[in-house]
Amino acid sequence: MATRAGTPYYISPEVLAGSYDMSCDMWSAGCMLYILLCGYPPFYGDDNNEILAMVQRGNFDFEGEEWDDIEAGAKDLIKKLITRPETRLTADEALQHRWMRKHSRVNQAEDNLKIRKLNLQNIKSFHKSERLK
């Protein structure tokens, strides 16, 4: 595929380069998981050009108090999704990741993910500033 199309917060570097395959969707899934867990995107900027420049660099972190209570397994999964295409997990591999398996059980009352109030507020703020697409 070669069409440059996508939303800056979720687009992968290879889409920006104009040569990509379906693995770019796993990058986007990693970005969405990041947002769902902490409430803000891994790549940010004051405008689309700044966001896209950060995406091309591909550097993100798990800094901030929002990440204090997030399991290491979730961070590991994100790192394996937001990475170079040749090392990026496939959808099947992501579903088999230990963190996904742990949290995909039907009855997990004792294991429920705890989303802190701060993280929910971050999602609300992000949603107000940038409409999710």
Image (cartoon, helix red, strand yellow):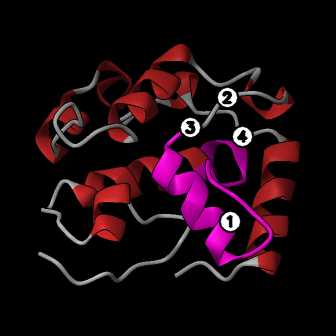
Quarter holding residue 96: top left
Horizontal side of residue 19 vs 63, given as left or right: left
In this rendering, the label closer to the viewer, 1 or 2: 1
Q: Which residues are magenta?
A: 35-59
Residue 48 inside the magenta-drawn segment: yes
Q: CA distance from mark 1 to mark 2?
A: 20 Å
Q: Give yes or no for contact between labels 4 and 2 (Cβ–Cβ under 8 Å).
A: no
| Mark in the foreground, 4 or 1 | 1
Give, as a three-letter code, the residue at label 2: Phe
Name which residue type carries label 4: Ile
Q: Please tell me which residue lies in front, 4 or 120.
A: 4
**Circle 2 residues within 10 Å: few <14, some 14–19, many ≥20:** few
Residue extending furthest toward the top: 72
- Residue at 40% x, 79% y is 6
Circles 4 and 1: CB atoms closer than 8 Å: no
For residue 50, which numbered disc appears in the image? 1
- Tag 1 or tag 3, which sits nearer the N-term? 1
Pair 4/2: label in front: 2
Q: Secondary structure at mark 2?
A: loop
**Residue neighbourhood size for the residue with mark 4, other residues' Cα within 10 Å, grouped as few (<14), some (14–19), many (≥20):** some
